[in-house]
Image (spheres, rainbow, N blue to C red):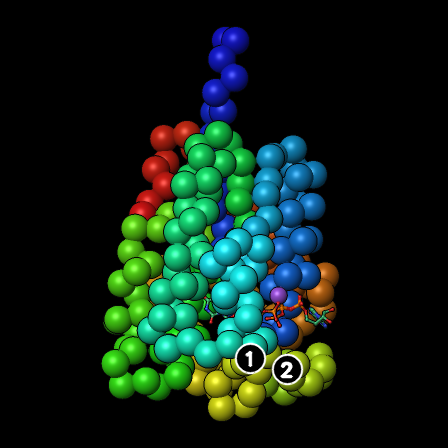
Amino acid sequence: GLSTRPTRRGALIVVEGLDRAGKSSQCEMLRDFISKRGDEVKYIRFPDRTTAIGKLIDSYLRGSSHQDDHSIHLLFSANRWEVAKSIEEDIASGTTVIVDRYSYSGVVYSAAKANPTLSLEWAWQPEIGLPRPDICLFLSISPEEAAKRGGFGAERYENETMQSRVRELFRTIFEKQQDVSIIDAGKSIEEVAQGIQGAVSDCIARLDATTPLRK
Ligand code: T5A
Ligand code: NA
């Protein structure tokens, strides 16, 4: 008919992984891949350092300001909530949204601090109700491979202690999590992209207009 309503909603695709796993490079390639299929697509990333909340996070990550562990955790979460509605609207109108880091980074980096009152369970609470990804691609890389991609930068969390705790916690949560594709991110950029494209194509093929976006 003449309806402009899409026959299929967009997909919510999350890319997660350790520092230097290649998330941003792969998100850009995935955006081009989906666009070439003829689908509408958007690429967003967290933290979004451009908003008022994002500026507080940016200052904290650069080491220019201090925040209580719980407080910064809630700011990272709030930084997702402030765009949750627009993600839902995009998905409903047929646009696929690729998200570079999401709740999984949120809970893992905070819980990795080993603060006795900041457990994984505590960290999950403010994430409950956010749009849930249709697929999460976890880019897995060994510390040796990651090290080949350059040394740590100056930002908070870019040190061996944090990174090894983060690696352990990602493993813990992704063992129990469904809808996660673990991708060997130690391969060439092209090989990694192909693995991601296969997993995403399968996911999109399973979606239609009646598949609800979960929370
Ligand atoms: N954080 C984040 C929280 O604590 N809570 C939260 O809720 C959230 C959302 C900033 C920090 O915030 C924390 C986590 C982080 O510590 P960020 O801004 O996303 O998060 O981090 P970035 O520093 O931007 O990203 P990464 O360092 O993690 O890098 P990427 O995106 O994984 O990797 P990318 O694509 O930039 O590639 C890195 C280098 O490797 C090369 C690239 O060319 C590049 O030089 N490369 C490859 N080389 C060889 N083979 C391949 N397959 C390669 N793929 C990429
Ligand atoms: Na990145």
Label placed on residue 154: 2
Residue 189 drawn at (x, y percent): 71, 65
Residue 110 drawn at (x, y percent): 39, 75
User: In the image, 191: left or right of 133?
Assistant: right
Please state which of residues 25 and 71 is positioned toward the viewer in this rendering. 71
Q: Are marks 2 and 1 in contact (CB under 8 Å)?
A: yes
Please state which of residues 24 and 59 is positioned toward the viewer in this rendering. 59
Please state which of residues 19 and 117 is positioned toward the viewer in this rendering. 117
Quadrant of the image occupied by residue 67:
bottom left
Query: For the point 35% across and 51% down, which residue is it?
Result: 130
Quadrant of the image occupied by residue 70:
bottom left
Residue 42 drawn at (x, y percent): 59, 43
Residue extending furthest toward the top: 1
Please state which of residues 155 and 169 is positioned toward the viewer in this rendering. 155
Amino acid type, residue under disc 1 in the picture: Gly
Residue 109 drawn above or below residue 54: below
Label placed on residue 99: none
Query: For the point 41% across and 41% down, which residue is it?
Result: 85
Q: Quadrant of ligand 2?
A: bottom right
Q: Which residue is mark 1?
A: 63
Residue 202 drawn above or below residue 145: above
Identify the secondary structure beneath mark 2: loop
Residue extending furthest toward the bottom: 161
User: In the image, 146: left or right of 108?
Assistant: right
Q: Earlier in the sequence, mark 2 or mark 1?
A: 1
Query: For the point 44% across and 35% down, which residue is it?
Result: 89
